[in-house]
Structures are given as structure tokens and as C-alpha cells.
Amino acid sequence: MDGYRKEYQNKIGVLLTNLGTPKSPTRKDVKKYLNQFLSDKRVVDINRLLWIPILKLIILTIRPSRSAKLYQKIWTKEGSPLLVFMHRIKNKIIKILEKQNTDYVVEVGMRYGEPSIENALTKMKESKVSKIIVFPLYPQAGSPTTSTTLDEISHVFSKWPWVPELRFINGYHDNNGYINALSKSIENASKKEGVPEKILFSYHGMPERYLHEGDPYFCFCHKTTRLVAEKLKLSNDDYEMAFQSRFGYEKWLQPYVDEMIPSLAKNGTKHLQIISPGFSVDCLETLEEIDIQYRELFEEHGGKEYSYIPCLNDSDDQIELVKSLIMNNSKGWH
């Protein structure tokens, strides 16, 4: 028994998670991914008896082909940008943690698609990890992101005879390192592209009903925006905030990005910079929706200069932020 305890006691697992991605930009793989994603009650929480037939018979018949074409626009030789950046972050973090005395095991697990959270946790189990830090890379915690991540981890652990100690990083929307990193990326963009007439902070949307039911995501987004604006000493006229990526007919968090951009252009904004702080790494919603669709929308309505500020991705600031949060959450385990 002593040997068993010694075998496990020094290993700390770090599970880096994100939403996920199809295996390839083909209709078949996109359909498989969307089926898993849209079947999650945290993502679409309407009555299952109503939703599942709509999903299976209508949405999964029409949407995969259309979404596959969008993924093809942003796919790289290395694969899905989201997964590529997640692995880069993992590899850089491993090199940093190797310098610590404690034995860390770092894995990437996607909530939907591969590599799955279950696969990542199984690897940790095989590596005899006794303590796990779960790090969902969602700065603004919410039900369809961090909460569903915990749901999946609980589901995996329900099948294990023994559960390791667990620490869960539930967002970091007001973390100083995160705010500083965002502020620096905006400053760098302004130096490169010129100071814009307006900076637009775009966050992924969710049904407004979630806010009234107690999800604080909306408030977290506002706090992040306010802290960055204060850091950069922006006036109220210098920036706007809105929500993107809505679907369906339900009222979502407002204002909507696809309505704000034409309004800004029509009212004389010629130079717009847009940043999406809710995404830790670039993905379909940033590279295709923001950098392609919204650029075209801005120009169609009279805008002249449009620049998208990339996510933190695997930048030095991002790696320092991730390292700092891991070290803070592993205190007492060394």
C-alpha cells in the first residue's frame, strides 16, 4: 500500500480543454461533430422531445454541408486551427513545467470531437496522476462552456472506481495577466494598422434567457471589456461591445454584432478594429465569421479599413497567463 501511495502522490495532471472541432472539413466529420455538440443540453436546452427530431431530421440534413464549406476556408495544412493552437500551447507549457520539481502530465481534451476529454483523462490515469487541474480555456465562464466541461468530467469519473483530487479553473475574465495580454494585443494592432475610429469587442452569444436564469456570462463579458478599456484609457466613444454567432429565433444577448457593424459603417465609421476576447485561440467563429463575413459586411455598408485582432493563441503572453494560472491552482500540491 505504501508503494501504491508513493507511485501516485507526486503527479499533477493539467487538462487543457476547449470546445472542439471536426476531424476534417468534410460533411461526414462535420455532421458527427455537430450531432455531439448540438445534442448537449447545455448548448440547446429546449425540450428533448421537440429538439432531437428537429436536430436529426432538419439541422443535420442541411447544416453539415454548409458548415463544411466554412471550415474549408480556414483549415490549415496542420489541421483545424483551434486544435493546432491547443497543441502548441500544450507543448510550450510542458517545456515550462519540466523546469519545476513536481511531475506534471499535460493533456488536451476537447468537449466535442477528438481528442476527447475522456481520452485525455484516461491517459492521466495510465500515468498514475493523483491530482488534476482542469483548465477550460474560456475566459468568461458560462453554462455552454465551463459548466458542460464539468458535466463531461463528472460523467467520465462516474465510471472510475477511484477519483483523483480535482481543481477546476472556472474562468479568468478579470485576471490581471489576461487583461494585460488583451490590452497589449490591441496596442500592437493599433501600431501596425493605425489607431481605429472604433474598437469592437465581440463575444460569442447565448440566449438572453440564460442570463435571467442565473448564468453570469453576460456580466463577465462586460467586466472584461470595462477592464481593458480602463487599462487602455479608452473613452466611451472609442469602443463598442456586442455578441456574435446567434442562431434560431429566440432572443439572444444584445446588441448583435451583425447589426452593429452596418450601423457603425452607415454612421461614418471608416476604420474598425474588432477583437473577440471570449476565444482563447482562433477558430471558425473568429477566422471565418469575424475576419471574413464581418469584414465583407463592414465594407458593403461603406466601411473602408477593417482589421481583426487575433486571439492570444500561443503567444508569449498567453503562455505566461496559462502558466501563472496553473501554478496558482497547484499551490499546496507540490
Image (cartoon, helix red, strand yellow):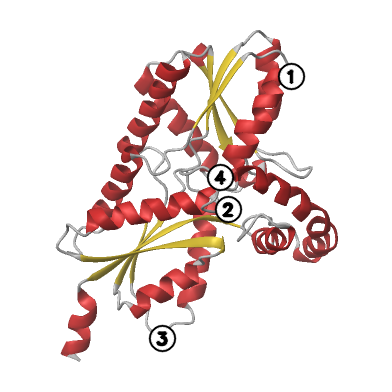
Which quadrant does the C terminus fall into?
bottom left
Outermost front residue? 77
* Disc nearer the start of the sequence (3/2): 2
Q: Nearer the viewer, residue 122 or 5?
A: 122
Q: Which residue is mark 4?
A: 283
Q: Nearer the viewer, residue 236 or 289?
A: 289
Outermost left residue? 101
Outermost bottom residue? 1
Indicate the amino acid at tag 3. Pro
Q: Which residue is mark 3?
A: 161
Q: Residue at x 80, y 64 (%)?
A: 56
> What is the distance, in whole Å, between disc 2 and disc 4 at their CAs?
17 Å
Could you say whether the residue bearing mark 1 is in a helix, strand or loop?
helix
* Disc nearer the start of the sequence (1/3): 3
Q: Which residue is mark 1?
A: 300
Mark closer to the observer (4, 3): 4
Q: Nearer the viewer, residue 250 or 36?
A: 36
Disc 2, disc 4: CB below 8 Å?
no
Q: Which mark is residue 174?
A: none
